[in-house]
Amino acid sequence: MSGSNQGKLQLSGRGVACVRGGREVFSGLDFAAVSGEAVAVTGRNGSGKTSLLRLIAGLLIPAGGTIILDGGDAEMTLPEQCHYLGHRDALKPALSVKENLAFWADFLGGERGDAAASLTAVGLDHATHLPAAFLSAGQRRRLSLARLLTIRRRIWLLDEPTTALDVAGQDMFGGLMREHLARGGMIIAATHAPLGIDSRELRIGGAV
Amino acid sequence: MTALAALIRRDIRIALRVGGGALIGVLFFLTVVVLMPFAVGPDLALLSRLGPAILWLGALLASLLTLDRLFMADHEDGSLDLITMSRTPLELACAAKALAHWLAAGLPLIVATPVLGLLLNLDMVATGAVALTLLAGTPALTFTGMIGAGLAVTLHRGGLLMAVLVLPLSIPVLIFGVAASQAAIVGPMTFGAPFSILCALSLVSLVVGPFAAAASLRHGLD
């Protein structure tokens, strides 16, 4: 029995406030998410979708409020149990597709999936030895997705995940997200476009 | 340990590939030292007296040249976010990155020193002394330079600020590095005293550098 499939996760934020560059982005934000559920964070540009993901990932310090994870691994902090897929792909142009993925698998550690299988799942198996510099924007995104599959973590924080993916890529990604949810994972995605899976909407900063 | 080894391996691999930083530093070092005899003139006695200082200056500037990219590249492509979030303490990750930088960019300078010593009319003993002081002193340059590299990410200003911040920290290293080399070549001081201080500077920076850089990176999260 693999450890990551056990227990119910509950992520909850109470009165979370975010200040960036002296400007209050949002305040008094309450949210909750449980395992097996996808939450689509929506809102107009600049409403703080990315900021919310970065707060959960521990990459920003909340100006107020608390973010708590219940039911996770007690030995690890919240960010250590999250995958963060940001605007930037965290790929090194000089390294090949395989080397990029192998580095993150070694560095992030934890429970490992099969790297080759992940590359096949995202449709990059034909390009494993190609330097990442030669990848298109969509292929770079696919390689980032392979990272989420290779290292098993239960919480996925996705920032505009479908950007640059073609229609087939979005379908593939929808399938991967459904599998992740079925395994007891949690997805929090900031998005403008439909995610392609059933999700609950969390709207920040009023109507569009 | 796997995580740190992976980080060191990755950084060295990137540095050694085309467009990486390792070669740039050595080439710069080579250029500075090769040009110096032409600038100073054909006075062999003067050249051998200036030799250690020229080699040390060249090595100092060459290691500063590539240091400002130490965290900037990871910051720009988002890798730094994932490194910050990971289970590896940020201090250890910083130390691993500095070590990788020293292995890829600092060690080649020391290997190149004997060849360049010939151009500066240094004999075997003098070249050996300079190489030994560089081996003891360049880690200090890298690990103090790392503090500046961390601040450069935080403050969103690139190279110049970093050079201004780091240069005062590297002055003691330069002073004792050259002093130890000179002591070995002409005396009258013993080699041991300045060399011990140089080693001490390296050891202190090995401890302080990673903590200072990690603190700076954490403070600059955005």
Image (cartoon, grey):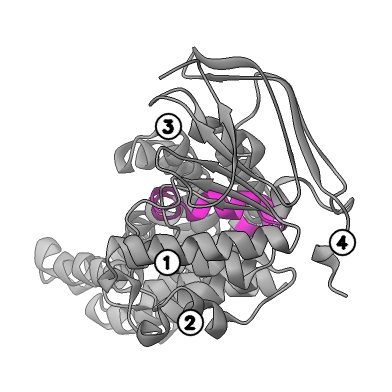
User: Residue A93's x, y, as percent?
Assistant: 34, 68
Q: Chain of mark 4?
A: A
- The reply to whether label 1 and label 2 mark residues of one chain is yes
Can you say whether B5 is above or below A206 in the image? below
Tell me how far mark 4 sits from mark 2, CA to CA: 27 Å
Tell me how far mark 2 sits from mark 3, CA to CA: 41 Å
Image quadrant in which you'd find residue B98: bottom right
Where does label 2 land, which residue?
Answer: A120
Does the image show residue B132? Answer: no
Can you say whether B15 is above or below A208 in the image? below
Front residue of A60 and A188 = A188
Can you say whether B79 is above or below A21 in the image? below
Where does label 1 land, which residue?
Answer: A142
Front residue of B84 and B14 = B84
> SS of the residue at dot 4?
loop
> SS of the residue at dot 3?
helix
Give the mark nearer the N terminus: 1 vs 4.
4
Residue at (46% x, 26% y) in the render? A43
Amino acid type at image mark 4 = Gln
Q: Is residue A185 left or right of residue B62?
A: right
Magenta region: which residues?
Answer: B72-93
> SS of the residue at dot 1?
helix
Amino acid type at image mark 3 = Leu
